[in-house]
Amino acid sequence: MFPWMSGVRYKSGNSSYGNTPHSRGNYMFNSSETKGNINAFSNPKTVAFQSFSRSSSAEPKAWQNGGGMTSSSSYTYTGKETGNTKQLQDNARDKNNFQQQCGIYMQTIEDLKKSLSLESEKNRGLIERINGYEQEISNLKQELTKIKSAPRAVDESPMLRKQVGDLSRDREDFMGRWEKEVHFRKGIEEAFAAYKKKSEFDINVLNQQLADMTQRFEATKSTIMTMETRIRESGKSETNIQDLLRQVRLAAEEELRKYQSDAELKYSKSISALQTQLQGDAGVIGKLEQEKTQIMGSFGDLKTRIASLEAQIGAMGQEKRSLEALIAQERSMAASQLHEMERRFKEMQSALFVKLEELHVSKESYIPLKAEIEAMKILLAEEEKRLSTPIKYTTTVKQTIHQTDSSFTNKSCFENGGGWTTKSRGNIGAMGQEKRSLEALIAQERSMADAQLHEMERRFKEMQSALFVKLEELHVSKESYIPLKAEIEAMKILLAEEEKRLSTPIKYTTTVKQTIHQTDSSFTNKSCFENGGGWTTKSRGNVYAPGGTSTRRTYYSK
């Protein structure tokens, strides 16, 4: 029997009170007053409801082990009609209190449901954000693999460093918030489950109490109306209080037995329904525990994945720092190599300009030499032609005898109009010796010129090969040295033009005028070049007739 069913309840209508007439006094039956302290949550899982038999002298206990209610009942019989009115007011007050408590519990349940829906929405939003961040992390991993496979991008490293730092801070922030939300949600779910169970139990208790109170109120009301009707109908002034009390007691006991049987029947039905509900709740709790286990397992997997992603991000940061250090080292090496190449290029350019100046000077210095060689070739050709032509002499010899010395003078004139006038003293030398000496001198000059030309060609080839080597070295960084490449191409063109200019033969036209003095055994050869050559040759020596001994020539460069 439930603790709220401890009061006496009367049914209306069909109870028989006997045929004995009642007394004329207005004696009313007052129901029991119940005062108790209900603790519905002292031990709801282990303490079962126990039925008990009611007696007028003992105080029943609703719970065997630590039950939360103690009730005491007393029956009071009064002769006034105001007692029933007070009982009705107390019942109405209790009904209003129970309705207010039920409304408070329902409002609490609605608030808890709203808070649960809000927390569910928050958790759903957090899960969506976590999924979004996981998608973003997967996209970043794909971009990282693309960046690793792609060529190095020097300018993107600061931006990637900033993005990784921002993402790491956001991830740590959201992880902290997510853990706080998980703990808060767990506490809210546990509190909500407890409040839900408590509210369901309180609602059931209040509904049963309300139904009991309503039924008792209706039964009491109908009993009062019936008794008032019977009292009015009887109209007899019987004052046998003992018989009246006995009849009332019998009716009350019969009503109490009916009430107990009905209460036990309802109690058994409610116990079976409550057990069924508890079994259903146990199944729901098992499902919730299983879902909780799955969620905790998925949470552990997510924590493992987050830890692995953190490790990957740390490795990526370390690799990025090493790559940045390597890039800085490569930049410094490239800058130093660039400065070194610029320095070497400037040195090579200055050396090339010096060589070009030397080539220009040597070209200008070799032009008169080649012109004189050509003039000597012409002279040799004329001498050979003259020597191969027979010479006719007309000689006039005058002899004068002096006292202290004897001398003779031979004057020879060429009949063919030759340009030579010779005054001989002593022996006349042969012209063949002069020819041979001139040929030897020309051969020596030619060999010296050829040697110098070969040396210049060798040096030019060495310089060209060195230039090609530098060009090959500069070809590695051709995109960075476009102006330098254009300058080198211009230098190539200049070198080609100089080489072409050096390989072009030079033509000279020479006129030789020779004057032979009569007073001295010396002659001067002046060569004037029609192209403005700058050489004058002065030859000093003795010229002898064929069969002579020596010829001495000295060359001066102007």
Image (tube, rainbow, N blue to C red):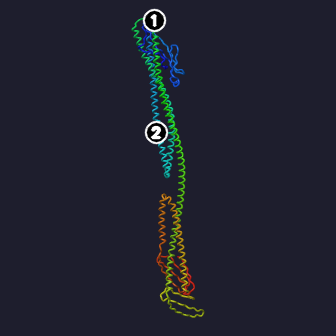
Quadrant of res 82: top left
Contact, CB < 8 Å: mark 1 with mark 2?
Answer: no
Vertical comparison of 478 with 285: above or below: below
Tag 2: Cα neighbours inside 10 Å, few (<14), some, or many (≥20)? Answer: few
Tag 1: Cα neighbours inside 10 Å, few (<14), some, or many (≥20)? Answer: few
Instruction: State the mark number for residue 128.
Output: 2
- In screen coordinates, is 217 left or right of 322? left
Q: For the residue labelled by badge 1, is the local secondary structure a helix, a strand or a loop?
A: loop
Give the mark toward the camera: 1 or 2.
1
Instruction: Please give the count of numbered marks on the rendered protein.
Output: 2
Vertical comparison of 426 with 85: above or below: below
Vertical comparison of 429 with 322: above or below: below
Residue occupying image coordinates x 51% and y 74%: 366
Nearest the eye: 356 or 66: 66
The disc labelled 2 sits on which kind of residue? Answer: Glu
Nearest the eye: 148 or 381: 148
The location of residue 229, given as percent across then percent down, is: 39, 11
Residue beneath disc 1: 240
The location of residue 64, given as percent across then percent down, is: 54, 20
The location of residue 306, given as percent across then percent down, is: 52, 41
The disc labelled 1 sits on which kind of residue? Answer: Asn
The answer to which of marks 1 and 2 sits earlier in the sequence is: 2
Residue occupying image coordinates x 47% and y 87%: 417
* Residue 520 in sight in this render: no
Q: Mark 1 and mark 2: span between their CA atoms?
A: 84 Å
- In screen coordinates, is 89 left or right of 403? left
Instruction: State the mark number for residue 290.
Output: none
Nearest the eye: 22 or 275: 275
Q: Which residue sits furthest right?
A: 404
Q: For the residue labelled by badge 2, is the local secondary structure a helix, a strand or a loop?
A: helix
